[in-house]
Image: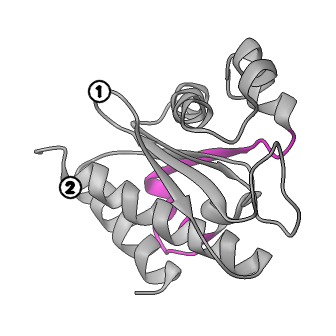
Amino acid sequence: MTADEKAHRLVTLLSEHGLTAATCESLTAGLVAATITTVPGASAVFRGGLVTYASDLKNTLAGVDARWIAQDGVINSITAAQMTLGCRKVCGADVGMACTGVAGPDPQDGEQAGTVFIAVVYRGAPVVRHLQLEGSREEIRRGTVERLLDLGCEAVLGSGD
């Protein structure tokens, strides 16, 4: 299934469940939001997104704890989880979706290219997945988008509604 097909599936599921979603993106720099909004009717379920490409914006826009960032950097599960909570709050959405990682080609914060954390929050605590993707910078970014869209669908389907 292509990223566009996955986005269509997510928009359909959100619509069927009467839910809205928001994104907080780092390495994908808005590609998740752009992919979701290619779907006709996305405006009924997509509230908006934060592009927190710079580390400090994860704190100022998404509310990721600045002490955490200073101590452990931004490429980890805690940062991804906090990003989901921040975008959901700032955008007033039911579902928050986030990604942080290294697209490459060079390492960042001691992490190799392809190290990615994706997270989704709907009910309860955020669900975070650690990915180790391979390929070019663009392949890593696209792989992140596809997997985050899948995780968003899983969260909605697991809602029990």
Q: Taking 148 as reference, is 105 above or below it?
A: below
Expressed as whole percent of the image width and height from the top left, the position of residue 145 reads 57, 67
Give the left or right position of residue 43, taking residue 71 as reference. Answer: left
Expressed as whole percent of the image width and height from the top left, the position of residue 137 reads 78, 75
Expressed as whole percent of the image width and height from the top left, the position of residue 15 reads 31, 57
Q: Amino acid at mark 1?
A: Gly
The question of residue 39 being in magenta is answered with yes
Image quadrant holding the C terminus, namely top left
SS at circle 2: helix
The question of residue 42 being in magenta is answered with yes
Would you name the residue on which mark 2 appears?
157
Q: Is residue 55 visible?
A: yes
Label 1 vs label 2: CA separation?
Answer: 14 Å
Residue found 54% across the figure and 37% down from its top: 77
Image quadrant holding the N terminus, namely bottom left
In the picture, residue 74 is in which quadrant? top right
Is residue 34 or residue 83 the one in the foreground? Answer: 83
Give the colour scheme shown: one colour
Residue found 56% across the figure and 30% down from its top: 78
Would you name the residue on which mark 1 appears?
124
SS at circle 1: loop
For marks 1 and 2, the one nearer the N-term is 1
Residue found 69% across the figure and 42% down from its top: 75
Q: Amino acid at mark 2?
A: Leu
